[in-house]
């Protein structure tokens, strides 16, 4: 049995180690926080530069170079071309500890900007065969600037840092140039982004017009919906518009199927238990006013939060299409492509992260989010390792977030104070997770 003196010595050593660890954590927090505060003008400059030069998914060549050059300038080893245009770098702290990944998406949208900003986008390009404007209408320019700043702050504190941090700058969150292809987070995972470096947790954020600037939105469990892109091909029989009985009208048949799906959602699915949205965004058919065409195509989206509900709704949709087509002596084929699973914040991780967010922005600025029917392919990462995703308010004081132009609007207007809020929150989450045993 150890002597009392030896026990006392061991206890003293343990206390000294804890005090040293606490002092080291405090030092890293101070260095990183001060560095990030000094960087805020740079975050604004980076965001404006990226905003003025937006690039669609898998075309983020200029943005990727800006990011890669910045990370190399910080002395980090950088991988480029991951998931076509993604950029990845790993920071190793001065002491052993956990591994985490921080993710930002880089792509813009096929939207013509209408903000009137002095640095507004004037970029034009082609998207799926159509000439379009290009705009950071979702705020990914802010996400890139925030993570560039957080990376620099963590590098400044690396000697005191326990653990390792992967910075993931992801392309094509909004989807691929051609529907049905692997893209974004899923493609980065296919190409092994987490193979050699598997994080203990992954974190991401999104600026959000539905919250006032200074606020942070969080939720434990399901947060954002799964997103499926569906295409319904309806086949009929062409005939003269004055003699519909000689043919099969795919336009009427397509309308009947679409209305049938809405009745199905309203009367067959328990949306009180798990919300479901099924929307058609395109209905294309015919070339002339007095010709009933051979074919019609409907394209839309399905949003769900529960995988079992998703499978049930798709099966019912397919059955409705088949039955209506059979009754009309036509044909119908439904194709469904999942672009993103539901984003679910692991409850244990959410509980661990909440104090960090409160420390960064104040408990009074925390907002518990409802279920959000938009989708995010961050869920691909969070289905691989535990994940947590949060929202950062971006609507200026004096503007009602409920009526402000929402993300994806050509008038989406980000208050740049969100850059400070978002970067401070993300940095605190990273520091606290790394400092915890």
Image (cartoon, rainbow, N blue to C red):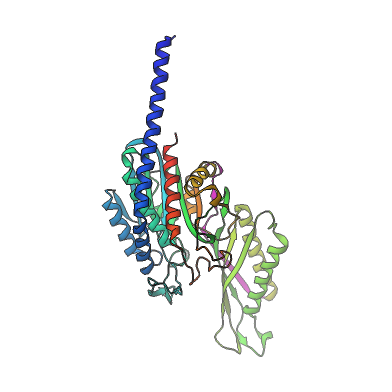
Q: Is residue 59 visible?
A: no
**Span shown in magenta:** 329-348
Residue 293 is one of the magenta-drawn residues: no
**Which quadrant is the C terminus positioned in?**
top left
Task: Find residue 4 and report its image quarter.
Answer: top left
Residue 376's x, y, as percent? 50, 57
Count the labels in the image. 0
Residue 129's x, y, as percent? 43, 76
Residue 331 is one of the magenta-drawn residues: yes
Residue under the point 37% across and 65% down: 48
Toward the viewer: 6 or 263? 6
Task: Find residue 70 and report its image quarter.
Answer: bottom left
Toward the viewer: 135 or 334? 135
Magenta region, mostly helix, strand or loop? strand
Residue 138's x, y, as percent? 47, 64
Toward the viewer: 403 or 176? 403
**Which quadrant is the N terminus positioned in?**
top left
Task: Find residue 16 and report its image quarter.
Answer: top left
Residue under the point 39% across and 53% down: 147
Left/right of residue 123 with respect to residue 353 in the rendered view: left
Q: Is residue 116 visible?
A: yes
Q: Is residue 33 above or below residue 21?
A: below
Q: Is residue 225 above or below residue 177?
A: above
Residue 82's x, y, as percent? 35, 55
Q: Is residue 208 above or below residue 428?
A: below
Q: Is residue 387 above or below residue 304?
A: above
């Amino acid at each position: 049995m150890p002597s009392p003196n030896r026990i006392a010595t061991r206890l003293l050593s343990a206390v000294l180690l804890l005090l040293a660890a606490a002092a080291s954590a405090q030092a890293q927090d101070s260095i990183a926080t001060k560095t990030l505060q000094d960087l805020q003008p740079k975050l604004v400059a980076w965001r404006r530069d990226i905003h003025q030069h937006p690039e669609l998914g898998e075309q983020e060549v200029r943005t990727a170079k800006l990011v890669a050059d910045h990370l190399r300038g910080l002395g980090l080893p950088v991988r480029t071309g991951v998931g076509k245009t993604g950029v990845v770098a790993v920071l190793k702290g001065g002491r052993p500890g956990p591994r985490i990944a921080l993710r930002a998406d880089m792509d813009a949208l096929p939207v013509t900007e209408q903000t009137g900003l002095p640095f507004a986008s004037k970029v034009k390009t082609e998207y799926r065969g159509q000439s379009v404007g290009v705009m950071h209408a979702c705020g990914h320019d802010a996400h890139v600037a925030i993570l560039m700043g957080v990376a620099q702050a963590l590098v400044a504190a690396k000697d005191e840092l326990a653990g390792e941090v992967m910075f993931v700058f992801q392309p094509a969150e909004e989807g691929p140039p051609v529907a049905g292809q692997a893209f974004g987070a899923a493609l980065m995972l296919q190409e092994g982004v987490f193979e050699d470096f598997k994080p203990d947790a992954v974190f991401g954020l999104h600026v959000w017009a539905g919250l006032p600037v200074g606020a942070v939105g969080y939720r434990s469990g399901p947060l954002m919906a799964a997103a499926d892109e569906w295409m319904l091909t309806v086949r009929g029989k062409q005939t003269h518009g004055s003699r519909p009985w000689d043919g099969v009208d795919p336009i009427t048949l397509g309308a009947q199927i679409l209305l049938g799906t809405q009745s199905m959602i309203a009367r067959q699915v328990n949306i009180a238990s798990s919300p479901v949205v099924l929307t058609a965004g395109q209905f294309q058919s015919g070339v002339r006013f007095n010709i009933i065409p051979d074919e019609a195509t409907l394209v839309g989206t399905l949003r769900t939060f529960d995988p079992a509900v998703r499978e049930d709704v798709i099966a019912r949709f397919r059955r409705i299409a088949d039955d209506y087509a059979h009754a009309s002596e036509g044909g119908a084929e439904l194709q469904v492509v999942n672009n993103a699973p539901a984003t679910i914040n692991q409850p244990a991780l959410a509980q661990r992260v909440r104090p960090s967010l409160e420390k960064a922005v104040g408990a009074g600025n925390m907002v518990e989010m409802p279920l959000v029917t938009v989708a995010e392919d961050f869920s691909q990462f969070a289905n691989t390792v535990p994940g947590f995703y949060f929202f950062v308010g971006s609507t200026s004081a004096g503007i009602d977030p409920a009526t402000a132009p929402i993300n994806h609007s050509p008038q989406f207007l980000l208050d740049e104070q969100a850059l400070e809020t978002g970067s401070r929150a993300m940095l605190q989450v990273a520091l606290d997770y790394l400092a915890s045993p």
